Amino acid sequence: MDLALELGQPAELLARTMTEREFQRWQKYARSRLLPTRRVEYYMAQIAQLIAITMGGAKDVGLQDYLIELRQEEVAEVVDLEAARKAFGYNPRRKEQ
């Protein structure tokens, strides 16, 4: 999904048109350099951390404290996933196992 957002293409289109080799190259790139949006998030977190430290309000904090990392269970608490599926008519072809 992140790759689809970065490339401005629907994930389904990428799944149909991107070769496995190209996808693996994107994975390698993302592991070593991060996708551009994620890099920007890290830069912004570094700036926020630096400001907090220089203002004296951040004593025992790390960079992770300034990054938004939602786990799946946290997303489920924020959004009623079943209601969203019904609202958007989402009907997956494969059943979850």
Image (cartoon, helix red, strand yellow):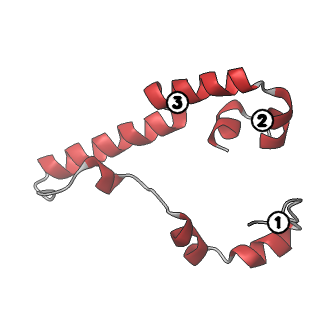
Q: Position of residue 5 (x, y in %)?
A: 68, 40
| Amino acid beneath label 2 | Gln
Mark sitting earlier along the chain (3/1)? 3
- The residue located at (76%, 72%) in the rendering is 84
Residue located 11% across and 57% down the image: 59
- Which residue corresponds to the image point at 24% horizontal and 47% vertical from the top-left? 49
| Disc number lying in front (3 or 2) | 3
- For the residue pair 77 and 44, the one nearer the viewer reads as 77
Quick one: 9 or 58, which is closer to the camera?
9
Specify the quadrant that holds the N terminus: top right
Graded by Cα atoms within 10 Å as few (under 14), some (14 to 19) or many (20 or more), the crowding at tag 3 reads some
Residue 11 position within the rendered picture, expressed as x and y whole percent measured from the top left: 77, 41
Q: Quadrant of the C terminus?
A: bottom right
Residue type of the residue flagged with mark 3:
Ala
In the orientation shown, which residue stands out farthest toward the front?
A: 97
Q: Nearer the viewer, mark 1 or mark 2?
A: 1
Determine which of the numbered discs, if any, sits on residue 95 in the image. 1
Report whether 60 appears left or right of 39.
left
- Distance of mark 3 from mark 1, alpha carbons? 29 Å
Mark 1 or mark 2: whose residue is earlier in sequence: 2
CA gap between label 1 and label 2 equals: 25 Å
- Residue at 89% x, 68% y: name it: 89
Residues marked 3 and 1 touching at CB (< 8 Å): no
Marks 3 and 2 sit apart, C-alpha to C-alpha, by: 17 Å
- State the image quarter where residue 69 is shown: bottom left
**Which residue is identified by label 2?**
9
Numbered mark located on residue 30 in the image: 3
Instruction: Provide residue 39's location: percent of width, then percent of height.
Output: 45, 34
